[in-house]
Amino acid sequence: MIYVIANRLSGGGKGAACLKKAEEILSARGAEFKTLITEHAGHGAALAKQACADICCRRIIAIGGDGTFSEILNGMDLSVPIAFVPAGTGNDFVKGAGLEANTEKAVRAALDGHVTLYDILSVSGKRCLNIAGTGFDVDVLLHEAKIRKVLPGKLSYTVALLRALAKLRFTDVKLTIDNDKHMVLSVFLLAAANGKYYGGGLPICLDASCNDGYIDLVIIKKLPRSAIPHILYKFFKGELKQVTKHVEIHRCKSLTFDTASSLPVNMDGELIDGLLPARIAVQEKRLQVMTF
């Protein structure tokens, strides 16, 4: 039995179109499958748990965006292989992991492909697929949560980005890397990267890999406001590591950070409260992904 878990609303309705296509392919191939539809935030985790409780479940096809994928990851049994059908606005994990972006090819991978093992992150006991962090990206998402009610898709994120810049604040962080390197610093942004992209295609760390057994920790330190346009230009170009005056990148296995302001943590594009102090560790080759 294949369980299809889909967010029909992801990507402004793209999820519904991808689900229809996936079901057509599965039916044409005579595959035994069952479709479960997410109905509210967090529902993906419950549906994944439900699917994996069925002893006949041999794999999951997840349809949605990064937030839906993260929910499913947090509910599923990691002994069950999964295929990802991207249907969100950003699709950052699929892009960074080099997985199939086309629905037909992704479903074919679920049916005819092989298992490739990918790393995931543990964030204070929760599973993270792509990126976890704090700072400017959290401010953007806080603004975007209000704006998305009136502006669609990437436009809401762009407006939120501009609002966060207008009300710019830096975040004081206590940080420990691999249990032996301790820092207290003020940051523009701190991101523990398993993948390469976040925020709808922004290249946070092009050297990151989802199956190398490491976290790429990107720190943009407090900097003069006059330097922010240059930093953002380098960020959008994927060249942050060149800005050595304001940027540090550490390859590590684990880290812990805390903030005085008790901000939520950005985890796979969703704001999660109650994770601080955030303890992040790489879990090597834990996720079985269906690929060609």
Image (spheres, rainbow, N blue to C red):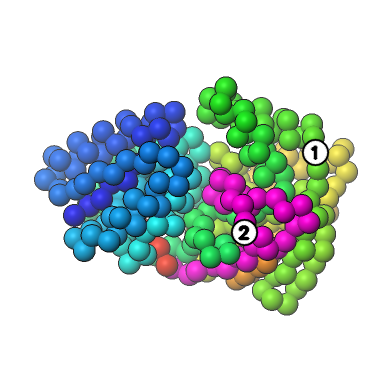
Instruction: Report the disc number at residue 71.
Output: none
Question: Which residue position is annotated with label 1?
Answer: 168
For marks 2 and 1 on the same chain, the one whose residue lies earlier in the sequence: 1
Q: Residue at x 34, y 54 (%)?
A: 48
Between disc 2 and disc 1, the foreground one is 2
Element under label 1? loop
Residue 39 is drawn in which quadrant?
top left
Residue 45 percent location from the top left of the image: 40, 52
Most extreme residue toward the top, as rendered? 150
Classify mark 2: residues with Cα within 10 Å, few (<14), some (14-19) or many (20+).
Answer: some
Which residue: 62% across, 70% down? Answer: 254
Q: Residue at x 67, y 34 (%)?
A: 143
- In this rendering, would 74 be left or right of 49? right
Q: Quadrant of residue 244?
A: bottom right
Q: Quadrant of the N terminus?
A: bottom left
Q: Name which residue type carries label 1.
A: Leu
CB within 8 Å, label 2 to label 1: no
Q: Position of residue 151 (x, y in %)?
A: 57, 23
At x 14%, y 44%, the residue is 29
Please state, as top left, top right, bottom left or bottom right, where the C terminus lies in the image: bottom left
Badge 2 element: loop
Horizontal placement of 66 versus 238: left or right? left
User: Looking at the rendered structure, which numbered label has been put on residue 275?
Assistant: 2
Q: Quadrant of residue 156?
A: top right
x and y percentages locating residue 205 in the rendered image: 62, 52
Residue 35, given in percent of the width and then of the height, sits at 25, 43
Q: Nearer the viewer, residue 212 or 178?
A: 178
Residue closest to the eye, 279 or 216: 279
Residue 270 painted magenta:
yes
- Residue 136 shows in this picture: yes
Amino acid residing under circle 2: Leu
Query: What is the magenta range?
Result: 257-285
